[in-house]
């Protein structure tokens, strides 16, 4: 005892940031025994056991069952250790990437909602368009559900795996379809993203755009579209190609569908 530095069960539990009951359990199942027990049954742990405890807790954090951890420790060799740790390192990298994706999504949702809170949804405005890049789904065919399902599925897979984008996804519609009252004729889904040469992107560099907001369920959007087209006509503007709709306040941020808000953007030219 005197030639070694020992910790009581309580002190070793504090060092490893676990409970005393955890150490008792590990001793009971043969996963980690105390280095020394005195004549009164008191348990003592060596500081050198901290490394083993760290590995146990790390593997447990990776959802490896205690039974498998015990088996690994009891038969470990340099080769088996390297193999297991490589596998776990790969899993950790995947988990880190997934968490980074979730964080990116959360931060974007915060920015969108903070901007929405400061916006007057009753206004229709003419604004200068900022250069941006869009990732588009394949063309959505209004008479082919199977093709549409495949296009949407492929689009979301790329959004989640490549763009780490799950919220800022909108719909492109042809101007003539909306003008004809065909509000369900979606042309593409789109996601705004930073430029990358890894994906085919659409550069949106229209110089001017009319922006309006629809509050409530999309089924009642006709009034908003009419108001925006009246604004365009009154200001001697001409809509260009497609309009873009994006959810600003949705079921994630409000619990009443009558309070949903959709941002509508229509690129325009003068003359």
Image (spheres, rainbow, N blue to C red):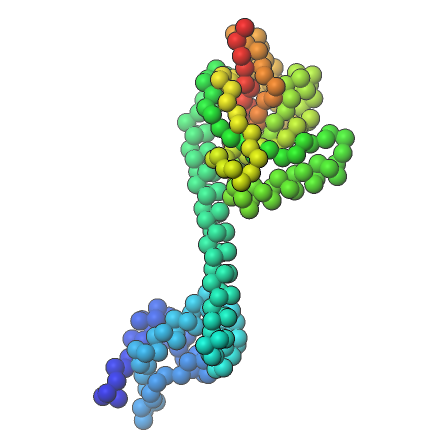
Visible residue check, residue 220? no
| Tag count | 0
Left or right: 12 in relation to 146: left
Residue 206 pos. (x, y %): 51, 20
Q: Is residue 13 above or below residue 39?
A: above
Q: Quadrant of the N terminus?
A: bottom left
Visible residue check, residue 204? yes
**Residue located 31% across and 81% down the image:** 46
Residue 184 pos. (x, y %): 68, 27
> In this orientation, which residue lies closer to the viewer: 237 or 30?
237
Left or right: 145 in relation to 168: right
The quadrant where residue 110 appears: top left
**Residue located 34% across and 71% down the image:** 16
> In this orientation, which residue lies closer to the viewer: 133 or 185?
133
**Residue located 65% across and 42% down the image:** 153
Residue lying at the far right of the rendered structure: 143
Residue lying at the far front of the rendered structure: 197
> In this orientation, which residue lies closer to the viewer: 190 or 109?
190
Residue lying at the far bottom of the rendered structure: 39
Q: Quadrant of the C terminus?
A: top right
Residue 36 pos. (x, y %): 33, 87
The quadrant where residue 32 appears: bottom left
Left or right: 46 in relation to 109: left
Residue 15 pos. (x, y %): 31, 71
> In this orientation, which residue lies closer to the viewer: 145 or 81?
81
Q: Is residue 33 above or below residue 57?
A: below
């Amino acid at each position: 005892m005197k030639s070694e530095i020992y910790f009581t069960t309580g002190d070793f539990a504090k060092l490893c940031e676990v409970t005393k009951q955890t150490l008792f359990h590990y001793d009971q199942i043969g996963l980690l025994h105390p280095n020394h027990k005195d004549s009164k049954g008191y348990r003592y742990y060596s500081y050198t056991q901290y490394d083993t405890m760290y590995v146990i807790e790390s593997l447990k954090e990776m959802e490896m069952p205690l039974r498998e951890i015990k088996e690994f420790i009891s038969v470990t060799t340099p080769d088996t250790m390297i193999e297991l740790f490589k596998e776990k390192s790969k899993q950790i990298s995947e988990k880190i990437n997934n968490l980074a994706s979730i964080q990116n999504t959360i931060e974007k949702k915060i920015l969108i909602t903070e901007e929405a809170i400061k916006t007057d949804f009753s206004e229709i405005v003419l604004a200068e368009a900022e250069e941006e890049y869009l990732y588009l789904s394949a063309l959505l065919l209004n008479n082919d559900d199977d093709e549409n399902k495949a296009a949407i599925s492929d689009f979301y897979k790329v959004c989640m795996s490549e763009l780490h984008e799950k919220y800022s996804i909108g719909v492109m519609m042809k101007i003539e379809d909306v003008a004809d009252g065909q509000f369900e004729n979606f042309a593409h889904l789109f996601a705004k993203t930073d430029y990358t040469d890894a994906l085919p992107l659409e550069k949106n560099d229209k110089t001017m755009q009319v922006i309006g907001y629809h509050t409530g369920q999309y089924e009642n959007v006709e009034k908003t579209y009419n108001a925006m087209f009246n604004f365009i006509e009154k200001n001697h503007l001409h809509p260009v190609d497609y309009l873009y709709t994006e959810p600003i306040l949705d079921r994630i941020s409000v619990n009443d569908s009558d309070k949903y808000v959709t941002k509508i953007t229509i690129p325009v030219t003068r003359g």
